Image (cartoon, helix red, strand yellow):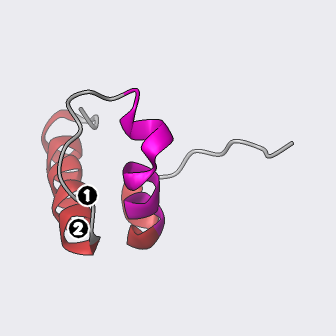
């Protein structure tokens, strides 16, 4: 069984995030998820989450 570990988004390779967000099994359970998750979109998403973290102390 794989262990779960927690990391900040910038520590995770963008290709892994893109693969995860493009997985049909994930998309099936996230009706608001749309569009293609490529590297530029992941970079934009991570930057947005980091800005929220800097402003509010959490990634929402």
Foreground residue, 8 or 20? 20
- Point 27% across, 60% down: residue: 37
Q: Quadrant of the N terminus?
A: top right
Q: Secondary structure at mark 2?
A: helix
Left or right of 27 in this view: 57: left
Residue that appears at 32% across and 29% down: 30
Tell me if 59 is positioned left or right of 3 in this view.
left
Give the residue number, with chain letter if any, for mark 1. Answer: 46
How many circles with numbers are drawn on the protein? 2
Whether residues under marks 1 and 2 lie with C-beta atoms below 8 angstroms apart, the answer is yes
Which secondary structure class fits the magenta region best? Answer: helix
Other residues around mark 2 within 10 Å, as few (<14) / some (14–19) / many (≥20): some
Above or below 2: residue 11: below
Residue under circle 2? 43
Q: Is residue 18 magenta?
A: yes
Task: Using the image, tell me which numbered label, if any, was put on residue 16.
Answer: none
User: What range of the chain is rendered magenta?
Assistant: 16-29
């Amino acid at each position: 069984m794989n262990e779960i570990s927690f990391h900040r988004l910038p520590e995770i390779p963008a290709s892994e995030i893109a693969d995860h967000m493009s997985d049909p099994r994930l998309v099936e359970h996230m009706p608001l998820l749309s569009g293609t998750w490529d590297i530029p979109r992941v970079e934009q998403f991570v930057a947005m989450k980091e800005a929220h973290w800097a402003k509010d102390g959490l990634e929402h």
